[in-house]
Amino acid sequence: MDVRNQGLAGVVTADTAVSMVDGEAGRLIYRGYDIRDLCLHYEFEDICYLLWHGRLPDQEEKEALKAEFREQRKLSKELISLIQLLPENMPMMSVIRTCISSLGGASFSWPPTSDQAVKLTAIMPVIIAVRYRWVKEGILVEPNEELSHTANYLYMLHGSIPEKAHLMAMNAYLILTMEHGMNASTFTSRVITSTESDFVSAVTGAIGAMKGPLHGGAPSEVTKMLGEIGGKSNVEPWLRDQLEHGYKLMGFGHRVYKTQDPRAEALKEVTASLVEKDDWLELAHEVEETAGALLEEYKPGRKLYTNVEFYAAAVLRAVQMPDELFTATFTASRIVGWSAHVLEQAENNRIYRPEAHYTGIVPK
Ligand code: ACO
């Protein structure tokens, strides 16, 4: 076996019109649009429509989709009971995997549809918020009928209408992390769809892939680092000490992007207006600047820049997202990309059936 194919690195598994990741140029394109423009000028629901239908919605289509999102965010009695019943110490990713899996009724039968995508996307942050507040406070919070998808998520988590700057930052974060080519969870969703299994199974499997620390678990490492640094005066000595000991700086470097990660740059731009109000973001900006110079000193020519996890951690902290919900919140955004791939796979389907190289004994 060619070991270069281990982990399918470099293997093209599908034609896709959903997104393009250009690591050399530092570009991420969703359906022909640069993500920087999308996250600054559009709402979450606009980009769902774009990824699922291939074009941006007009005003009427957007309003209809927003209404559908509001309608679909109501939880059934059975789902609320399940959220209350699951063991208190169950990780949130396992909770959402179990809750989504429980939805596999007839309305989710093959073939996958954009209505099914709305239902699953609308319900995911509601499950997270209801479960979180139930375990922490013993209360069952209700969605707010008046709010957009993003605003409602923050509202349900904190119990108050989010301020505009926080809403903008969260909206940008969710848009920027919706889709990123053929990553492990997206591939999982396409493999499951290729068997003509249902939408719920594809998303349940993808959540399982996302749960692994090699895929969905990095932003909390950045908050840990910022917490240890503590304040501006400690930035330079702390970073230098890490590099002296040969440790990696969390939130820097990327396998694909050998220039600025466009998602990190966009998040930095979106959060610029929040910096003065938020100590955490101010510290993040300081760390980025100092680390840039130190990495050039200790690792010259390695092209190490902040990755999306760095500013994701800063944004999630700024909107008071608890660390334990970081990966689940990432999942609530990535479900949009999975859904686009599920729909695309089903449109022109052929079951995935790769091969394995047998290394065992062959009987004589
Ligand atoms: N801090 C210091 N040095 C680094 C860092 C870093 N964050 N990242 C890479 N380097 C150095 C390595 O030590 C290595 O140096 P060497 O040539 O002297 O051996 C060189 O840069 C190349 O590093 P690799 O680990 O080979 O790069 P790779 O592309 O395999 O790894 C990765 C990319 C895993 C993201 C790496 O940069 C890293 O571990 N970063 C920190 C963790 C992190 O931020 N993870 C989130 C990634 S974003 C995402 O997953 C969505």
Image (cartoon, rainbow, N blue to C red):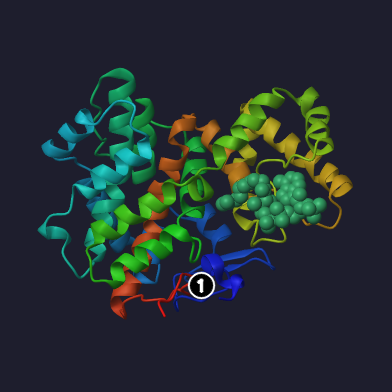
- Residue 300 is situated, as x and y percent measured from the top left of the image, at 86, 53
Q: Nearer the viewer, residue 331 or 299?
A: 299
Rendered residue at 50%/66% (across/down): 181
> Which quadrant is the N terminus positioned in?
bottom right
The residue tagged 1 is 32
Query: Where's residue 280, x and y in %?
Result: 63, 29
Q: Residue at x 80, y 45 (%)?
A: 292
Residue at disc 1, secondary structure: loop
**Which x, y percent locates residue 57?**
36, 65
**Quick check: can you spot residue 329?**
yes
Q: Quadrant of residue 65?
A: bottom left
- Above or below, 218 against 257 in this view is above
Label 1 crowd bin: few (<14), some (14–19), many (20+), radius 10 Å: some
- Residue extending farthest to the front is 364
Q: Nearer the viewer, residue 64 or 267?
A: 267
Q: Image check: 68 left or right of 302?
A: left
